[in-house]
Each structure stands twice: as structure tokens, then as C-alpha cells.
């Protein structure tokens, strides 16, 4: 009986983890308009978003102003700096500066001061799949949360983002953001 219970528990855990897996970004390879991060995030953007807990209740809202600057690093690779300025519904202000680097085959890597290690992402068609670990301060502790973002270009000005955040494979909540491009930066 114990062996059977272990088998059922292992199967249940496997099914639960599999159900948390994200959709493969390659499923969007033929979707238009085609997403080019260095073009879409070149200039000023504004995003409106909300954080929802695992039950679906909205816990916070925010506006984020982003200034994106494309460039090249010392080895000649395409880079993109995103300066994000957050204004939260509770009055708190935060900032994050991402440094993204284009890799091969539509892949990107990224760093920011509150990201543990490097973020990894892949662009296909109109979509970006972006994964990273965020060090989130809560009271006197710092929690490392896994983020899985799906970003979808709707038209040349609008992008929608759904981020699922989890810990130990357990979904804790979601973030929804609507980005709107304001103006490009002259190259």
C-alpha cells in the first residue's frame, strides 16, 4: 500500500508540475507583426499593470515609464538598456535598469540589480518568452521568485505581458501589463 501511495503521489506531483509549464514561444513563430526588441523598446513607453495573487485578487496596481536605448557592447553584440520607473498604487516608487544582450537564434540574456543571475528569453514571431529569478524584498527578508513572462506584440505600438511568478514550482500570482510605445529615440 505504501508503494502505491508513493506512486500516486509522484504521478500527481509530475502532473501538477507539467500543468505549470509555459507554452512554447515557437508556437508564435508565424504570428505578425514580427517582434524586434531593439525596435519596439527603442524610446519611451508607458505600461499600466496590476499584480494578482493566486486567487485572482488584485493586490497592487502600477504605472511604469520605460526609456529604451539600443546599442552595441564591446564585442559588437546588439544590446538594449531599459530604464524602468515604477509608480505603485500605494505611493511607492521603484526603479529597475535592465541590460539586455542579443544572443543567437532570437535569444536574449538580461541582467538587473534585483535579478538573480541572468534572465533568458527567446523571441519568435510576435512573442517573447522571458524567464528570470527576482529578488523581492518583503519586510526584513528577501524572497527569490521565479518569473515566467509571455510578451505579445499586438501592433506597432501595443504589447501585452502576462507574468506568472512562483516559488518551488508553486504558482503564487500573476502580473498583467499593457505597454504602449510613446516615441522612438533617434539613432
Image (cartoon, helix red, strand yellow):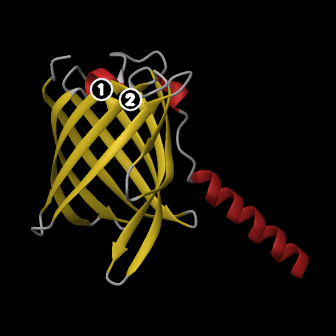
- Which numbered circle lies on residue 79? 2
Between residues 35 and 18, which one lies in front from this camera angle?
A: 35
Q: Position of residue 60 (x, y in %)?
A: 20, 65
Q: Residues within 10 Å of mark 2 (few under 14, many from 20)?
A: many
| Left or right, residue 36 beside residue 148 | left
- Which numbered circle lies on residue 70? 1
Residue at the spot x=36%, y=21% of the render?
35
- Which numbered circle lies on residue 9? none
Q: Position of residue 101 (x, y in %)?
A: 44, 32
Q: Quadrant of residue 155?
A: top left
| Left or right, residue 163 beside residue 87 | right
Which is nearer the N-term, disc 1 or disc 2? Answer: 1
Determine whether 95 is above or below 149 in the image. Answer: below
Q: Quote the CA–CA distance across marks 1 and 2.
A: 6 Å
Q: Position of residue 142 (x, y in %)?
A: 41, 74
Determine whether 156 is above or below 142 in the image. Answer: above
Quarter of the picture containing the N terminus is bottom right
Residue at the spot x=36%, y=36% of the render?
151
Q: Are marks 1 and 2 in contact (CB under 8 Å)?
A: yes
Determine whether 183 is above or below 23 in the image. Answer: above
Residue at the spot x=35%, y=45% of the render?
162
Q: For the residue labelled by badge 2, is the local secondary structure a helix, a strand or a loop?
A: strand
Residue at the spot x=21%, y=51% of the render?
49
The answer to whether residue 1 of the structure is visible from this angle is no
Amino acid at each position: 500500500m505504501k508503494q502505491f501511495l508513493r506512486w500516486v503521489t509522484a504521478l500527481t506531483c509530475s502532473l501538477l508540475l507539467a500543468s505549470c509549464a509555459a507554452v512554447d514561444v515557437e508556437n508564435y513563430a508565424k504570428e505578425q507583426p514580427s517582434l524586434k526588441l531593439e525596435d519596439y523598446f527603442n524610446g519611451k513607453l508607458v505600461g499600466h499593470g496590476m499584480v494578482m495573487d493566486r486567487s485572482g485578487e488584485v493586490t497592487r496596481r502600477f504605472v511604469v515609464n520605460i526609456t529604451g536605448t539600443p546599442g552595441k557592447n564591446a564585442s559588437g553584440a546588439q544590446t538594449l538598456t531599459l530604464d524602468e520607473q515604477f509608480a505603485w498604487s500605494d505611493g511607492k516608487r521603484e526603479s529597475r535598469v535592465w541590460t539586455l544582450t542579443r544572443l543567437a537564434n532570437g535569444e536574449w540574456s538580461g541582467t538587473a540589480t534585483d535579478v538573480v543571475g541572468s534572465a533568458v528569453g527567446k523571441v519568435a514571431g510576435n512573442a517573447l518568452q522571458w524567464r528570470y529569478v527576482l529578488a523581492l524584498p518583503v519586510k526584513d527578508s528577501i524572497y527569490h521568485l521565479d518569473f515566467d513572462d509571455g510578451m505579445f506584440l499586438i501592433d506597432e505600438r501595443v504589447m501585452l505581458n502576462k507574468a506568472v511568478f512562483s516559488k518551488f514550482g508553486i504558482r503564487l500570482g500573476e502580473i498583467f501589463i499593457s505597454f504602449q510605445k510613446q516615441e522612438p529615440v533617434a539613432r
